Image: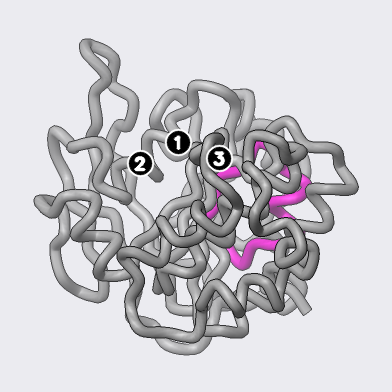
Amino acid sequence: MTASENGDRPEGGTPLLEVRDLVVYHGQLRALDGISLQVLPGEVYAIIGANGAGKSTLLRTIAGLHHPTAGSVLFDGTDVTGLRAERRAGQGIVMVPEGRRLFGSLSVEENLQVGASYARPGPWTIEQVYETFDWMRERRKQLTAQLSGGEQQTVALGRALVANPRVLLLDELSLGLAPVVVQRIYGMLPQILATGLTVLLVEQDVSQALRVASRIQCLLEGKTTLEGRPADVTANQVEAAYFGLAGAAPASPPGEGSEP
């Protein structure tokens, strides 16, 4: 059963990841304008929105790749806003970036070894990745540049998992992939969550995000236009929030609206 089918946020009210009033600029452009969110342990939290909404900027800021002008990022109650990306990864915030960003001249196994080089103690090893994605073992010596888009995305996911993250940031997993491939990759989420992971994902495919998420937040031009449980929002409200039309439901404050 997915988190969205459950309809409830996981037990425990203390956020593992929290963003407070985040403001980020790209030059003169305000890419994020006062964004806040709370992600509870074991949750799948989805950020949706059109191109240019600020979704990837949000994930990259949480990962430490962008520096905010204002606001803060807290991880397990500790302010990590000033930490470099590699320090955050070492603490358990690991991202699968948009476009995979694999080393095409390296083999599948060598790319996995890159992720393992900054691994925390935990259940995920290269061997466990091979057990989870069974096609990978036989092709572990193949260059990743020779793989299909879906295979590359799976290797990028495996590279992140071997670092044993506590929070896994997924940026546009479905981008450029056939629907059947997307379903196959998202079908692995329950198994991944079962190892104790928390997931914050960015997704343009709204229907896919609604299927897997326990909570969604919609961004438009760097601002929150909708936030809540998928079960509590209508298709019209999601459409209005996504495109900036009248009729979007007001965003509830982080942590509220989780009770029926």
Using the image as rendered, state which of residue 211 and residue 250 is in the foreground. Answer: 211
Image spot of residue 86 (x, y percent) = 23, 54
- Mark 1: which amino acid? Ser
- Mark 3: which amino acid? Arg
**Which secondary structure, mark 2?**
helix
Q: Is residue 212 magenta?
A: yes
**Which secondary structure, mark 3?**
loop
Instruction: Give how far apart the Cα atoms at labels 3 and 1 are.
Output: 13 Å
Instruction: Give how far apart the Cα atoms at labels 3 and 2 are.
Output: 14 Å
Is residue 172 left or right of 16 when viewed as pictured?
Answer: right
The residue that label 3 is drawn on is 100
Q: What segment is highlighted magenta in the picture? A: 201-215
Q: Quadrant of the C terminus?
A: bottom right
The residue that label 1 is drawn on is 56
The residue that label 2 is drawn on is 60
Say if residue 195 shows up in the picture: yes
